[in-house]
Image: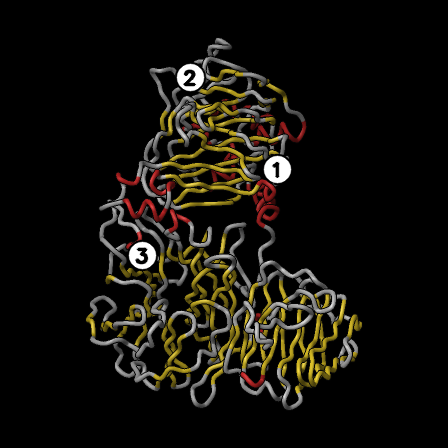
Amino acid sequence: MAGKPYRGKNPVPSTSSGTTMTTHKVLFSIILTLCPGLSLAAAQSPWDDAVAVWLMSQASGSLVIEGQVKLGVELSGAERDASLRRGGDGRVAQFAGGYLRAAFPAARPLELRGKQMTLCIRLQDSAGGSAVPLFSREVSGDEYANILYAHDGSLHYLWRTEPIERRVLGPVGPSKARRGKDFADGVLRLRVPVALIDPLRWHDVVVRFRGPNLELFVDGVLVDEEWPHGELYEFRGPFLIGAGYENGKLTRGFRGRIDHVALWNRALTDDEIVALSGGAAEVARRDREILGPPQASMQYWKPRGYNAWAGDCMPFYHDGTFHLFYLFDRRHHGSKWGQGAHQYAHASSTDLIHWEHHPLAVPIVRQWECSMGTGDCLWHDGLYRMFYTDCGSRCEYRDKPQRGSWIFTATSSDGVNFHKDLKPLLPGGDCTVFRDPATGLFHLIRGGGNRLVSRDLRDWQETPQDFVPRRPGTSGECPHQFQWNGWFYFILGTNAVWKSRSALGPWQEIPPTIYDGLFVPKVAEFTGNRRILAGFLFERGWAGHLALRELIQYPDGALGMKFPPELIPAAGDPLRLCLATANPGASGDGHTIRIKAPRRFAAAALGVLPRNVRLTMRVTPQPGAKAFGICLRGNGDYDGGCELRFEPGRQRAQYGVPQNHGPARDSTGRIAAGRDFAIENVEHLDRPFQVDVVVKDDIVDACIDQRRTMITRRDPEPDGDRLFFFAREGDVTFEDIVVRPLVR
């Protein structure tokens, strides 16, 4: 078997030893004898139908040494046990700048085609992520010859399909320019930072292509994925192990060890990938090391992974359970050549404290699906019915059964396992679906525009005129309708809200008091006649962390928001803080700060604060106070940090950045709006009010008097350890100050 590839159950003769390789089951029988703790299930190897396996025992006709490579290096101890457990033979190739050429006879060329394949390589990079090719095609003139390689501190995998002209209908010139060279050439790239996986240890790297999904596993842990379109292209030998081509020149330099390399013309199962990565216990351990511990609460939550995020939310309540559906995102809408490739993910809770994470509710199951757009979930006739959009207008694939963007449905009997029938229901994009309690008819609103009516959720009739009277420039994305205590509400995008006493209007636009920095929010009922809003906070691009709010309702139908008490992060005992600095006019202690600044700016600071805290206080302004507030993670003499400023005269709360030892100013000397957003219509800031602030990593979240909330992300993240209190042109007292460190 030394150095020889084998092809499935047809043994390849070993010319170097004169013996015949039967099948890999022989090796697993030996492993089972040597490792009695290994289960029989694990010993039934996925190697049996691999199209090629290269073990690194010794050179042969199909594994040729080029330069400084030593084959057959014996492992010992735990390293040998790990090799045997994964199907190796306890011997490895030691690379010192050379490489291996892996080939088949001309009469038996190796080429993988179609929509399935798996690559597995077990390696240790002694240089800790040096920029070198690891597995490449031996084609000097092909810029995409390198398949697996290290570069710029990351491990990369390059997948390739046929050029765009073979896959897309119509002219492709503008599409090529818009989506770039990778789209035109049919290239997708997976990567993982080597610092995340520990660059110096042994790694089991597995790449799996299974039609609509392409995945990169390291040590059995899914670290990146993409959503391809097309079949494998030019994936053929001969291959180079430890070398490749760059700008037409051979590049080598890998220094480390390789245990084995294998290829399959099928997608391995999850269990097989776990077996090739050391077993379930080992994979679970590495999962926590690589991705970190799971977060229990859905407040400020994102999927685990360095490039995984959460986008649009679609909450839904039924039979005592709050379902939080959201768009799972990688690359901030950059997956699938910028088409997004979003899918409906799902978590649920009966108390907002304990959450269960479920399989994807609406995944991509066909290559022609571009991205799932937002819709709604309904319960009707014993089924959960999920309405979603395939945003197909972004690319017209030849194999797509319908042109443009359409609305589809998926159904479930348990609210967890959904079935997609892939039958287009209506042309259109983002939508909301609801039932009018007055008539029993169902209504579907596409964007902020037209309304369709149905008795059975199957046959729809379009009605004239727009659903709501929209001002010019009002967004038409992510529409949403909900009802509460005899009032009906309609939301568009991020900051347009209407109310009505009827499900169909007439509608009155109201101030967007439920806009607080979260994007495209939607609302669902919760136990006790409560209403919970969910949205996401951007993180340097589309998608980010989720946050949930509890709505409050006034007799006239106006709305406000507060923190749901179940979702406030746990905090420790109150800290004992000392006065660190104080300007003239500022005084106090760790519990009360008084600022007297009738004609100027004054501030006082408490310190030293931990990085992540919960802060509560009562603010009492004197009549006429122009501006006042706090600055979190500040330093020096009011330098840096995140400022939360209140302006009673403008009924405004504003996040900002200190400037010149005070609030930011514009060219006229007035307090400027700053580079961050503000919320308007914040009433009663001239009276005593409560403030509750959570600071968690780069997120600052505030609740004002249990009636308004506002959230921001600080980039770059402030690194100061002082809490400032300030006032400008007024007298303000901050009392009952309590600061508690967050408990992870």
Q: Is residue 248 above or below residue 318?
A: above
Where residue 567 appears, as percent x and y from the top left, is 57, 70
Q: Can see residue 742?
A: no
Identify the image quadrant of residue 504: bottom left
Q: In this rendering, does residue 720 appear at all? A: yes
Q: Position of residue 63 (x, y in %)?
A: 48, 17
Check residue 459 in the rendering and tell me which mark sits there, or answer none: none
Q: Is residue 534 above or below residue 63?
A: below
Please report contact status of discs 2 and 1: CB closer than 8 Å, yes or no. Answer: no
Looking at the figure, which quarter contains the C terminus?
bottom right
The spot of residue 322 in percent (x, y) is 46, 69
Near mark 2 (Cα within 10 A), the count class, few <14, some 14-19 or many ≥20, is some
Q: Quadrant of residue 82?
A: top right
- Pointer 3 residue: 390
Q: How far apart, in angstroms, are the residues tagged by discs 1 and 3?
A: 39 Å
Task: Kindly report which numbered mark, 2 or 1, lies closer to the viewer in this rendering.
Answer: 1
Among the two numbered marks 2 and 3 on one chain, the one whose residue lies closer to the N terminus: 2
Marks 2/1: CA distance?
35 Å
Identify the disc placed on residue 12.
2
Hey, what amino acid is under mark 2? Val
What's the amino acid at mark 3? Asp
Residue 199 has which mark?
Answer: 1
Name above or below for residue 191 compared with residue 628: above
Number of other residues with Cα within 10 Å of mark 1, as a class: few under 14, some 14 to 19, many 20 or more = many
